[in-house]
Amino acid sequence: MSLALIAALPFLGALLPGLMIRAGRSACAIATGSATALALLGLLLHAPAVMRGEVIQARFDWLPGLGLNANFLLDGLGFLLAGLILGIGLLIILYARFYLSKSDPMGQFYTYLMLFQGAMVGIVLSDNILLLLIFWELTSLSSFLLIGYWKHLPEGRQGARMALAVTATGGLAMIAGMLILGNIAGSYDLSVILTQGEAIRASEWYLPALILILLGAFTKSAQFPFHFWLPHAMAAPTPVSAYLHSATMVKAGLFLMARLWPVLAGTEAWFYIVATTGLVTMVMAAKIALFKDDLKALLAFSTVSHLGLITMLLGFGTPEAAAVAVFHIINHATFKAALFMSAGIVDHEAHTRDIKRLGGLRTLMPVTFVIVTVAALSMAGIPPLNGFLSKEMMLEETTHTVWAGIPWLFPVLATIGAMFSVAYSFRLIAHVFLGPVRDDYPHKPHDPGFGMWAAPALLAVLVVLIGVMPMTMAGDLVRVVAGAVTGEAVAVKITHWHGFVPALWMSVAAVGAGLMLLGGHRRLDALWLATPRPEAKVIFEALVDGIAALARGVTNRLHDGATSRYFLIFTLGVLGAGWLAWSAGGHAPGLRNPLPVPGVALVGWLMLVVCTLLLAVLHRQRLLSLVLIGVVGLIVSVGFVYLSAPDLALTQISVEVVTIVLMLLALNFLPKTTPRESSALRRLRDIGVAAVAGVGAGALALAMMLRDFGFPTISDYHLANSKTGGGGTNVVNVILVDFRGYDTFGEIIVLGIAGLLIFALAEALLRGPANQRLLAWVPEEKKSGDRHPLMMVVAGRVALPITIMVGVYIFLRGHNEPGGGFIAGLVVAIALVTQFMASGFAWTQARQRIDYHAWIGAGVVIAAATGIGSWLATRPFLTSNFGYFRIPPFDKFELATAMAFDLGVFLTVVGAVMLTLASLSRIAIRAGETVNTTAMDTDPSQPAPAKEV
């Protein structure tokens, strides 16, 4: 199975829960699990090749000019992490089916889970760091949805915000680091970067790249001082906690450090930053875990501690330590997922996670007791379970590590961390399951059905099997993965007995001291509670509040609604930048001579200046201002014609007509005059600022026109390739639908959204409190008695088919002559607007057969389909194709795929304009406009009513 398909299957599977939930909860779980199972099967099909040490790649050019390619890579490391993500994900899906209550929207939960799963699989299979970054941020967004799944809980919302803020901030730092790394290596493909280790470590940019990348890894894997978000993520449902803490999100940072180990490890900076951070996190979190009374909080801090252990091993920078880190990733995933799911079972059955309210569950929940005991003993490092093996190997590695000339620092602190691990693991067993049965449980606990304990039981079996038969169950896998991490062959030997080595005595000391800590836990807990200590959550919230207050202060001062202040700041900024450029660079006189000014151009310019000045002087009279705006637009259109730009002229005049009509309709509900707000002194100041800005802009434009450009313009490329590349001689249209089609695509989406927003605002006005104001609205001026006169109705009716024919003609000729979909859409919209003006809203709307929403949707879909068709032809998005055809009796003619894209533009423009007009018309009707039942206010076929005498 293709690696791209394996990465895509979870995303495709995210579509199933919303559909299958209608068939029942079991059907929804089965459909969701089938997508994960299929991806897991596809991954396992590559297992033989991966175990032989082969690297499987799939390459797809996406944006090669930017170095962004959809390249995927599967080696031992990717195989291990993808297997954990998909395998434990499958168990989580089964567990969640029986854990979630009937009131929980299961379809929504599984959708979020599959999105998160897909993002994680994408991370571990990516062979392009830019693609990896996309998936990296997707994990932050999807985990936000999962952690905040129980939206009714304040702690769920707070935990989700905290996780997103911390991990997304680290992700931003990582983006910068990855870009530096790719720049050093000369490629953004990981397969290339991993071969440039010496060049990267020798680069002067190595340390900045290392720090930025580690910020992303540490925040994602909850390393000190970013550890605090992970325990607060426990507010999520237990299936989410089990998935995040065992196999997925927290492993992403470890994966990143392991993936980049060949190029970043091996330096003092790597050792002191990574190994020290891991050691501090390991010891600190283990100590905190011992004093947590919430089951999930205890397990959350234990997760942070074990993540620190793995980080420390990767930081040692030796192949042997890397192999131990790989082995503990496997072991931690098995026992931690089992423990979290078991904690969920206890909470589900006893209705509490408070350890002080539990105890004596051994006889009430024997199956759960066995699962928890096996997993907790493994977490404590008790033989012969798998956790013991990796703990012993970790302690052995610390004895070979010297920190700043101190050989005993790592061994001693690692032993202390192991001691706390033993203490909290045995506390989990003793304080929850041992002791007498209580009679004050919130709910009488008992073992759940098979469906809920099957998944943790399977993981507990793996804990035992790996512990008893380590080389058989995991030896080859660890060897292959360690080789992928280090880039060299690593000898792996996993055994229970290493002789009477220091690691043995360190382990014995940790177990003995841990049991002693457990024995004195009550007194130590009282001392812990009485000791003042900083709370990371309080510090984080204070920091966030401080940043928010600073942002509000700056925003309120700069964005106070005064347009004059905005203009002043902008003008001063432009002047400052101009002065800097003038003083720092050389100045050469212009080499171009000004052209003579014809009389026609001078008259047009004077009219434009006069109308603009009149607009500034008379702007308080809104109707007159609107007329002047229209005159300015018409003069600009004439200027485009004079400068031989017919496309721009057609567009300008069409836009002017449509916008003026819509603004007139909107102005109907507004005061006809604007109150005087500025004092005479302020107006003088504003005149001065405007004069300086205007003279400066004019001088800059003149200076630019008198000089040659410093770089070749892209217009030469467009002129040379318009016909050969786009199939059209109208360069402007070819630019819009081909060369810069993506810009046009974005613009029609924005236009469609604008139309939909106006519709939504109209709906709110017609249904909300503003409706009463509309009903009570009294127009300022008397209305015309004949709003739809006969001459206008007849003229509009005759002009409609002609105008539509003109619009079609402009549309068809647009690729080679002035025109195109945008102009044609405006022309047809003008024809329809004329019908509204001539015959009224009700009469015209009654003859409308297609909903305007559908016009917008169809336009965007058609435009998008044109771009996707380019992909199918293995060409960049929205690249047009064309050919020449002959259909008797017609002469040979050209057809281009750009016509379909232009059709999408046409439909979107018409739909957006007409939806806006219809929305404003509905407001007018609600405000008291009479609705005509015929095409005219006065029906000439009926006799006039008799006048009263």
Image (cartoon, helix red, strand yellow):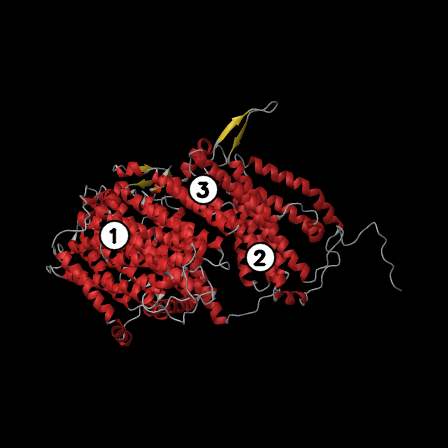
In screen coordinates, is 44 left or right of 606? Answer: left
The quarter holding residue 850 reads top right
In which quadrant is the C terminus drawn? Answer: bottom right
Give me the C-alpha separation between circle 2 and circle 3. Answer: 31 Å
Q: At which x and y percent is residue 852? A: 61, 48
- Report the residue marked by disc 2: 760
Name the secondary structure under disc 2.
Answer: helix
Q: Answer yes or no: is residue 676 visible.
A: yes
Question: What numbered label is drawn on residue 740?
Answer: 3
Give me the C-alpha separation between circle 2 and circle 1. Answer: 60 Å
Of 757 and 751, nearer the camera is 757
The quarter holding residue 39 reads top left
Mark closer to the chain start, 2 or 1: 1
Q: At which x and y percent is residue 782? A: 71, 64
Q: At which x and y percent is residue 578? A: 35, 56
Mark closer to the chain start, 2 or 3: 3
Q: At which x and y percent is residue 183? A: 27, 46
Residue that sits furthest to the bottom in the current view? 530
Name the secondary structure under disc 1.
Answer: helix
Kind of residue indicated by mark 3: Arg
In screen coordinates, is 113 left or right of 381? Answer: right
Q: Is 940 located above or below residue 372 in the figure?
A: above
Write the residue at 34% across / 43% down.
66
Disc 1: CA contacts within 10 A as few (<14), some (14-19) or many (>=20): many
Of 590 and 417, nearer the camera is 417
Q: Nearer the viewer, mark 2 or mark 1?
A: 1
Disc 2: CA contacts within 10 A as few (<14), some (14-19) or many (>=20): few
In which quadrant is the N terminus drawn? Answer: top left
- Report the residue marked by disc 1: 386
